[in-house]
Structure formats: structure tokens, C-alpha cells
Amino acid sequence: MNQYLKAVIVGTGFGGLGQAIQLEKAGIRDYLVLEKAQDVGGTWRDNSYPGCECDVETHLYSLSYEQKPDWPRDFATRSEIFTYLSNIADKHRLRSKIRFGVGLTGATWEPDQCRWRLSTTTGEELFCQFLISAVGGLHVPRLPELPGLETFKGQVWHSSLAVTAVLAVTAGAKTFIESASAERIRKFH
Ligand SMILES: Cc1cc2nc3c(=O)[nH]c(=O)nc-3n(C[C@H](O)[C@H](O)[C@H](O)COP(=O)(O)OP(=O)(O)OC[C@H]3O[C@@H](n4cnc5c(N)ncnc54)[C@H](O)[C@@H]3O)c2cc1C
């Protein structure tokens, strides 16, 4: 089904949710949000490694129109920020506007029609007057090109990729990964 909309927002991190709230406040309801993942939260959904937390005082790392005076600590944890974003999506009833599991794959401006033609991972085409990108700059993990990495025999992982219940412990010259249940410790390096 092809659909023409006033605006399409791409992404549901701070940027995308904030944009959606502003459209709602402006009385613009003819919009959709595309999110390739299955939930809101962006950075704070994807990164769940132990110790992941904000390095900016969280009273500042909040939306100015969604102040949260009762942050439990100065530098909130990843799950606290993720909950904050989830609650904002619920409070502003944004989830019904979000197409989860739909990624934007292409956007072409059609000058004669004064509209964007959007292609998506589901094959659906959308058209809109305004395209708002909030895709973030850090959500695609990148492994560094370290000399010798290709011959390294140990386990290599990226902190944003499926590392749950794992704790990295640095002790002297050795680094270990310890499962949170402490059942076993694997030598990492
Ligand atoms: C581990 C980590 C810690 C950080 N800590 C801090 C911090 O302490 N302080 C600070 O100021 N900043 C921090 N940042 C930076 C952080 O990314 C930004 O502060 C902010 O959260 C980015 O929000 P965003 O909405 O722009 O993008 P993101 O949160 O990255 O959200 C982008 C969203 O767009 C979706 N998306 C992307 N491409 C597509 C597509 N083609 N189609 C559909 N959906 C798409 C993604 O799935 C994602 O949900 C951190 C980043 C990381 C990775």
C-alpha cells in the first residue's frame, strides 16, 4: 500500500521521539515514525553492557519539555534512560504512530510532485512532504581495525551486540569476561 503523509520521522531515540512530540504539539497528526528495531530507545535500547550509563549529568541529558526531577542518580544508568524514553513514548501515545521493524532503505525527492518517495525494508513505499532523519550517528557498531585481529584466536565482541549478563574485568595485564552468574570465567586476552 502506498501512503502519502505530511511527515515521516526515521528513528525512535531521543531525536525521533522528540520530533514526534513536537509534531503532536503543533497539531500535526498526519505522520509516521519508522523504526527498524522492535522498540523505542535507540542507543539506550541497543547498549546494555554492564556499567553502561550516561556521562552527562542526567538532568541535562533530558528533554527540556520532559524534565524528570527524580532521577535516582546524577549519571543515570542505561536502563533508567531506556525506561525514561519508553515512558515518554507511552505518555505521548506515540507507539501507535511507530512502525516497528520497518527500516528506511531509500529516499528520493520528486521535485515535480514536491514530495519524498521512501522505500522500506518491508517493500512498502511511502510518500511525504517532510522527511525527518533521526537515525543517530552511533547505532551501527564498528569493530576497530586492530593489527593482528584477523589472527586473534580468542573471542571478540562488541559492547552493543548481544552482550548481556557478561562482565568485563580488567586485572593487571589480563582481561577476562566473567558471566554474571559467576559460573565460569573465560580467558579473553
Ligand atoms: C554506548 C553509548 C553511550 C552514550 N552515552 C552518551 C552520554 O553519556 N551522553 C551523551 O550526550 N551522548 C551519549 N551517547 C550518544 C547518543 O547516541 C546520543 O546522546 C543520543 O542518544 C542519540 O540519539 P538519536 O535519537 O540521535 O540516535 P539513536 O539513539 O542512535 O537512535 C537512532 C534510531 O534510529 C533507528 N534507525 C537507524 N537507521 C534506521 C533506518 N534506516 N530505518 C529505521 N530506523 C532506523 C535506530 O534503530 C535507532 O532506534 C552515547 C552513545 C552510545 C552508543
Image: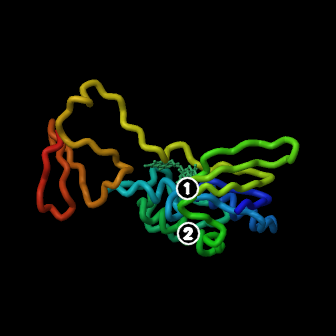
Residue 60 visible, this orientation? no
Q: Nearer the viewer, residue 12 or 172?
A: 12
For label 2, the residue is: 69
In the rendered image, residue 95, in percent from the top left (x then y), is placed at 61, 70
Q: Residue at x 60, y 64 (%)?
A: 99
Indicate left or right for 70 with 31 as reference.
left
Write the residue at 56% across / 69% down: 69
Q: Earlier in the sequence, mark 1 or mark 2?
A: 1
- Looking at the figure, which quarter contains the N terminus? bottom right
Q: Secondary structure at mark 2?
A: loop
Q: Nearer the viewer, residue 48 or 31?
A: 31
- In the rendered image, residue 158, in percent from the top left (x then y), is placed at 34, 45
Disc 1 crowd, CA 10 A, few/some/many (<14, 14-19, 20+): some
Residue situated in front as seen by the camera: 21 or 133: 133
Q: Secondary structure at mark 1?
A: loop
* Position of residue 25 measured from the top left corner of the image (x, y, whole percent): 77, 67
Res 63 seen here: yes
Looking at the rendering, in which quadrant would you find the C terminus?
A: top left
